[in-house]
Amino acid sequence: EIVMTQSPATLSVSPGERATLSCRASQSIRRSLAWYQQKPGQAPRLLIYGAFTRATGIPARFSGSGSGTEFTLTISSLQSEDFAVYYCQQYEDWPPLTFGGGTKVEIK
Amino acid sequence: QVQLVESGGGLVKPGGSLRLSCVASGFNFSDYYMSWIRQAPGKGLESVAYMSSSGSVVYYAGSVKGRFTISRDNARKSLYLLMNSLRADDTAVYYCARPYYMDVWGKGTTVIVSS
């Protein structure tokens, strides 16, 4: 089973600043990585797939990069609606599809 | 509009059973693998079970294997999860989602296992 590790667990950022979230896979997953945003009481929402392709309707301030075992989600200028928990997930080698433990982006 | 709607959650005693349902609309359900994902209170996301489009391939997480059964009815565009021998650590919001990356999610249904 591929283990996904996210860091940091919590990221404190001021509105308008850049946020950089990391995700590491225990073995190469090429570019088979997705990022999700989850707000309290809501289902996760797909942001990025294929490591860097934005899902439909996702603003350009969200960008993904990386390949192999190291990946990054960057939010270029945080808006109030971006404060949430973010998860990465691999789909290169499954079952199972595995998620990282999440990064909470909170207001500084 | 692509949509998944779960139902069937509730409060159940340890050792009890529940059957969750997920109804799909807006896409050709019979073409897709489908999955159940759960999230315990304050915790992350856990894959519970998957089923292939025809139903011939299934996967269960080790924590639920032997207790949960996934099934589907393509004619009804529905996915099911029969949960037996429920334990307190099965308490979670259960989501129906369309893998491999989960581009479509339901809103979830809450299962609480407590005496």
Image (cartoon, coloured by chain):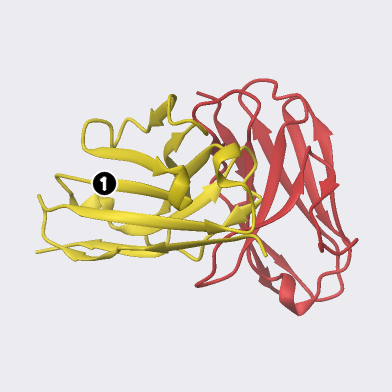
Chain colours: A red, B yellow
Residue shown at the point (59%, 35%) measured from the top left: A4
- In the structure shown, which secondary structural element does the residue marked by tag 1 occupy? strand
Q: Is A100 on the left-hand or right-hand side of B8? A: right
What is the x, y in percent for residue A45?
65, 59
Instruction: Determine the chain carrying the residue at label 1.
Output: B
Amino acid bearing label 1: Leu
Q: Is B56 on the left-hand or right-hand side of B15? A: right
* A37 vs A71: above or below: below
Is residue B1 or residue A27 the one in the foreground?
A: B1
Q: Dividing the picture into quarters, in which one does residue B110 lie?
A: bottom left
Is residue B28 or residue A17 the one in the foreground?
A: B28
Q: Is A22 on the left-hand or right-hand side of B40? A: right
What is the x, y in percent for residue B73?
41, 44
Q: Is A103 on the left-hand or right-hand side of B10? A: right
Q: Residues within 10 Å of mark 1 (few under 14, many from 20)?
A: some
What is the x, y in percent for residue B60?
36, 32
Residue shown at the point (68%, 71%) measured from the top left: A83
Q: Dividing the picture into quarters, in which one does residue A62 lie?
A: bottom right
Residue shown at the point (54%, 37%) measured from the top left: B33
Q: Residue furthest front?
A: B75
Q: Dividing the picture into quarters, in which one does residue A79 lie?
A: bottom right
Residue shown at the point (34%, 39%) measured from the top left: B70
What is the x, y in percent for residue A105?
67, 64
Mark 1 lies on residue: B82
